Every structure is written in C-alpha cells, then in structure tokens.
Image: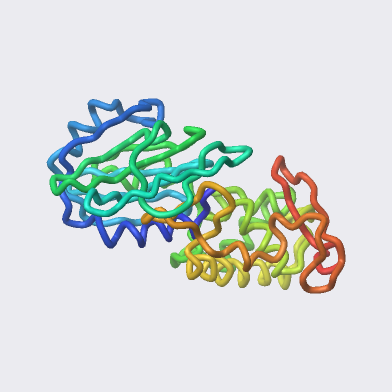
Amino acid sequence: MPELPEVETIRRGLLKYLPGRKIAGIEIKCPKLLINCSAADLERSLSGQSYADLDRLGKILIIKCERHSLLVRLGMTGQLTFRDPELPDHNEFKIHPVTGLQRNESQYSPDKHTHIIIAHEDGTSLCYRDIRKFGRWYLYANGDLDASPELKSLGPDPFRCDYTLENLREALRRTSRAVKTALLDQSIICGLGNIYADEVLFAAKIQPLRPADSLSDEELERIYSAVKPILQSSIDNRGTTFSDYRDADGNKGENVSSLKVYGRGGKNCLHCGETLNKASVGGRTSTWCPKCQH
C-alpha cells in the first residue's frame, strides 16, 4: 500500500504537469470509488477548472483546483499517473501472482483497471488505475477542505510543525496497544504504514509487540528521531515498489534495496546476522530482529 513517501513522490511528480492545466471532462468507470459525491457531481464541479496546487497530509493526496479540491486515498493498488498522448505508451505486462497484470515501466494507455480519467483541454490526462478498487476519492469545496473528516481525523504529519516529541510521547503513553499497532494509527502519526513502521522500530531498536505505554523516554525519543529520516530516505529513492506502486510517470520506486527488515522475515539481520522474526501484530505482518530489538 502506498505510504507517505510514495504519495509524496506522486505529488512531486504531478507538480511538474498539473498546475495551470484546465480540466475538460471526467470519465468515471467505477463510481464506487467516489465517496461523498456522484460521478455527475464530480464532473460538474471540476470541468472548466484549472489545477492550482497539490498538497499531501499523511497518505492522502490533495489535488487543489480553483474552487474545489480532490482528496485521493490510493488504497492497496492505486496508481495515479499523467498521460501525454504525444509520448509513446509502454503496454507490455507481466503476470503478478497476487494482483494480476503489472505494467513493466513508464506511461501506459488506459486499460480495464483504469477507472477514472480526468481529461485536460490540451489532450493530456490524469489516469487513476486500481486493480483491487480499494482507493477512495472525495470532493470538497476549497472552503470546506480543512474541516473535512478525512483530514481532521489525522494526527501529526512527520513533515509538519505539529510533529513533535512531546505530541508523540503523549499519544503513545495513552495506549497499551503494541507499539507497532499504535504507529499504524493515523490519528497518532499520519503517513506510516506497514513498511515504514517496521523500519522505524528496527532503527529505534524496539520490538514491535512492546506495549506503547511501556516505552521509556529514551525509547520514545529514538522512535521520534527515526521517523523523518527513514521517510525522507525513501522519498529520495522515489518510494518503495514491490508490485503495484508507480510514480506519476509510471516508474517504479527504488527504495526496496534500502529496507532493513520489512519483507525479510526468515532472512539474516543485516546488522547482527540473527534470523529475523516474522509474525502478525495487530493483523499486519511484522518483521523484527530478536537480538537488535527489545
């Protein structure tokens, strides 16, 4: 699932293309992706508007137009890419055993999994592709955006000023859940998902099953200090691709080789050589080193 670094990479990629472009029309093939509006409402509201800016809070992409904004959750397999008809498409696919057809690289023409196409007056388009259809789109007038339930329910974003050690300490001290489960709670800190929660806890040398309210001040500070550098490193690598994630140009992220524990259960710890544990924590597969993490 795309987490903060993947959504930020997409945001930065789309910033090259969208601002100033005018929306000509919208084709919606899967209306269930629209949560608080109908397909007709979306097209009526956005047609004729130009993109103004793109923002992000946690794992939510915010596409701002002149009068309305879109909030986009990519879900498990969502891909949001820019398509220029003057550039060649690369429509070669390989079969992935879980998620089906996966594109090899770069721009592609819409297929049966492309459920929303925002057409622009200059012939380009913004294409949303989602094999599992777990993505969610929300439409808000710009004046109502900050009060939207989707944004108001989120905790501090690691790249905003409300992400502080004090706020994190207070939130984690209020729960006895496993610290891995707490870090996945978007009301505590927004943007972390399964990949980066595992990586943060490894960097902080903390076992994911530890109750959050049992952590010492020093351990909490280690978690706090690990979050932003790990996320920034992934952003620098354009995100992590295992199967579906693509950036705005349709390319894979390159962060997989930087992961220390996620997806490596049963392999040797890169730090001490111990076999990495793998188990379900709060319903999510977690990986950790029994020697390095306590």
Q: Tell me if 166 is positioned left or right of 262 in this view.
A: left
In the rendered image, which quarter is residue 160 located in? bottom left
Whether residue 56 appears in this view of the structure is no
Task: State the scheme by which the image is colored.
Answer: rainbow
Q: Looking at the picture, does residue 171 appear above or below residue 293?
A: above
In the rendered image, which quarter is residue 212 located in? bottom right
Q: Nearer the viewer, residue 285 or 150?
A: 285
Q: Tell me if 197 is positioned left or right of 33 in this view.
A: right
Which percent across, then down, holds residue 268? 82, 65
Q: Residue at x 63, y 66 (%)?
A: 257
Q: Which residue is drawn at 18% across and 43% down?
A: 23
Q: Residue at x 75, y 67 (%)?
A: 216
Which percent across, then down, holds residue 18? 24, 55
Q: How many labels does the image show?
A: 0
Q: Tell me if 74 is positioned left or right of 219 in this view.
A: left
Q: Which of 190 and 215 is in front in this view?
A: 190
Q: Looking at the picture, does residue 57 appear above or below residue 232?
A: above
Which percent across, then down, holds residue 288? 78, 59
Q: In which quarter of the image is the C terminus?
A: bottom right
Whether residue 263 appears in this view of the structure is yes
Which percent across, then down, holds residue 150? 42, 42
Q: Which residue is drawn at 33% across and 42% down?
A: 109
